[in-house]
Image (cartoon, rainbow, N blue to C red):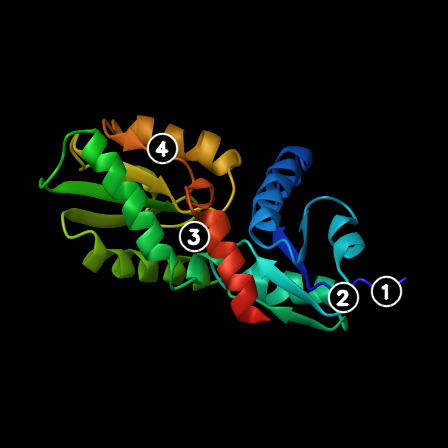
Amino acid sequence: MMADTRPIALITAHGQPSDPQPPEAALARMAAQVQDLLPMWEIRSATLSAPGRFEAELTNGAVVYPFFMARGWFTGKVLPGRIGTISHQMACPFGLDPALPALVAAAVHREAVQRGWTDQSYDLLLAAHGSARGPKAAEAAEGFAQALCPVLPNARITTGFVEQDPTVESAARPLGDRAICLPFFAQSGDHSRSDIPQALKAAGFQGAPMQVTGALPGVAVLIAQALVAAR
C-alpha cells in the first residue's frame, strides 16, 4: 500500500475557552469547504481553546493556517509555543492576506446596494478586537481600514475596538443611519454576538450590522489560495 503523500494543512483559530465546541464545529465546517476546493490536500482544523485538539491534529510538514486577524500575541507567541519543534510552514494570517480587502469590499458594496445606497456616501465602522498586550491587533485593523479606502471610495471608514480606545461605542456614536458595521473578527464569539451589539445599542447606532469578516462569502477560496501559496 502506498503512503498518503497529500499535503496537510491545519487551519487554526483562537476559539472560545468558555465554550470551545461551537467555534470548533464552525472551524470544521470552514475546513470542509476548503477541502472541497483542494481535493488533493488533507485539510484539518483545530482551535487553540479546545484542550489537546491542536496538538492532536498537528503533524510534521503541515502548513499551519492562522485564522486570526493580526500577527499579534496568539500568532506570535502562543501558536509558535504550541507548535514547538515540529517542522511546519506558516501561512499568512487571515486578516493580513492581501486578497482580503477586495473580498470585504465586495461584501460591503453588496450590503450598501441592498440598502439603496448606490452612488451615495455612507459610513463603515470596522469593529475590531484591539489588545492591551500590544499594538499589533490595532495596527492590523487600522492598516486594513486604509487598504479598504481605495476599493470603497463611497465609504467613510472608521475603526473602533472592544479592548482599547477608541471604543466601538465612541466610534459608532457620531454615525448616522446610513452606516454599516463590520466586525473585524475571524470567528463569531462573545465579542461579535454580545459586546459589539451592546456597544452599538449604547451608541444609538441605527445602521446595518454585518456578520464577522471570517464568515463572508469567498473566505474558503481565499484560504485555499493562501495554503497553495504557502507550500
| Dot 3 and dot 4 residues touching (CB under 8 Å) | no
Q: Circle 3 — which element?
A: loop
Q: Quadrant of residue 139?
A: bottom left
Q: Is residue 41 toward the left or the right of residue 195 in the image?
A: right
Q: Position of residue 9 (x, y in %)?
A: 66, 59
Q: Quadrant of residue 97?
A: bottom left
> Tag 3: residue type?
Gly
| Dot 1 and dot 2 residues touching (CB under 8 Å) | yes
Binning the other alpha carbons within 10 Å of mark 1 as few (below 14), some (14 to 19) or many (20 upward) gives few
Indicate which label's residue lies in the foreground, 2 or 3: 2
Q: Position of residue 155 (x, y in %)?
A: 17, 47
Indicate the quadrant containing the C terminus: top left, top right, bottom left or bottom right.
bottom right
Q: Quadrant of residue 192?
A: top left
Q: Earlier in the sequence, mark 3 or mark 4?
A: 3
Residue 130, label in figure:
3
Residue that carries the numbered disc 2 in the rendered image: 5
191 or 54, which lies in front?
54
What residue do we see at 51% from left, 55% from top? 223
> Tag 2: residue type?
Thr
Residue that carries the numbered disc 4 in the rendered image: 199
Q: What is the spatial separation of the Cα atoms under label 1 and label 2, in whole angstroms?
A: 9 Å
Binning the other alpha carbons within 10 Å of mark 3 as few (below 14), some (14 to 19) or many (20 upward) gives many
> Tag 1: residue type?
Met
Q: Is residue 154 above or below residue 66?
A: above
Residue that carries the numbered disc 1 in the rendered image: 2
Query: In the rendered image, is residue 47 in sight?
Result: no
Q: What is the spatial separation of the Cα atoms under label 2 and label 3, in whole angstroms?
A: 40 Å
Q: Earlier in the sequence, mark 4 or mark 1?
A: 1
Q: What is the spatial separation of the Cα atoms under label 3 and label 4, in whole angstroms?
A: 15 Å
| Dot 4 and dot 1 residues touching (CB under 8 Å) | no
Q: Circle 1 — which element?
A: loop
Q: Position of residue 205 (x, y in %)?
A: 25, 29
